[in-house]
Image: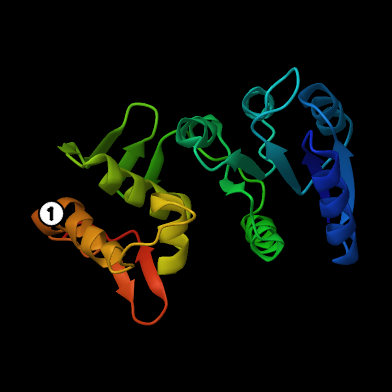
Amino acid sequence: MRVLVVDDDARLRRALKRGLELEGFAVDVAADGDEGAWFAAENAYDVVVLDVMLPGRSGLDLCASLREADDWTPVLMLTARSDHDDVARALDLGADDYLAKPFSYVVLLARIRALLRRGGQRRPAVLTVGDLSLDPARHVVRRGGDVVELTPRQFSLLEYLMRRGGEVVPKSDILEHVWDFDFEGDPNIVEVYVLQVRRRIDQPFGRQSLRTVRGAGYQLVDEAAP
């Protein structure tokens, strides 16, 4: 498996290259967006690890150019903790996942492996699970022809579950992605919001698509209309 790491932090590049190579990956590294674009054009990768803030061409620009070229190699974005707008833009542009700096190498490795399992298939701009659709750019959710009103946090929770493509998503993943990397509140807040989203997208339509998998997490599935 071949990984491209694009980051302007030389120490981080060296550490990631060394660690990933010990795991058996072939690793190329680039120090800026232009160099990263050259590597991506010249080679086929299984995963791209891409910093948002880069000298010259930004990571957001590089991610957008990959998708415009119909290159759907999984992209893991690296961001500063406070860059919530950049995270949203990255996901809207076609990035698959993100990690906030500083991060655990063990978590990064797990995210890379998850992206490898997902593969490089094309991912549409509008997410769909059955007749449930979510447009990240327009911030609109529909169940069939009906618009479903959600708060920003409810929207983020639903978007994350839809991006995970039917996987059983642990509560810890939801807390890190929908709330914050260093969230220190009551983790039961996830259950509260899952219940709220279920009341919006399922109950009025007689569905049970947002499911609790006891002891494992939550899963969004395609359930046909009754």
- Report if residue 165 is visible in the image: no
Quarter of the picture containing the N terminus is bottom right
Crowding at mark 1 (Cα within 10 Å: few <14, some 14-19, many 20+) = some
Report the residue at 29% width, 46% height from top.
Answer: 153
How far across and how far down the image is residue 70, in percent?
66, 29
- Report if residue 90 is visible in the image: yes
From the viewer's perspective, is residue 61 above or below residue 116?
Answer: above
Q: Quadrant of residue 199?
A: bottom left
Report the residue at 39% width, 72% height from top.
Answer: 217
Q: Quadrant of residue 34?
A: top right
Task: Report the residue marked by disc 1.
Answer: 205
From the viewer's perspective, is residue 226 above or below residue 130?
Answer: below
Q: Quadrant of residue 30?
A: top right
From the viewer's perspective, is residue 201 above or below residue 140?
Answer: below
Q: Residue reaching furthest left?
A: 204
Closest to the observer, 100 or 36:
100
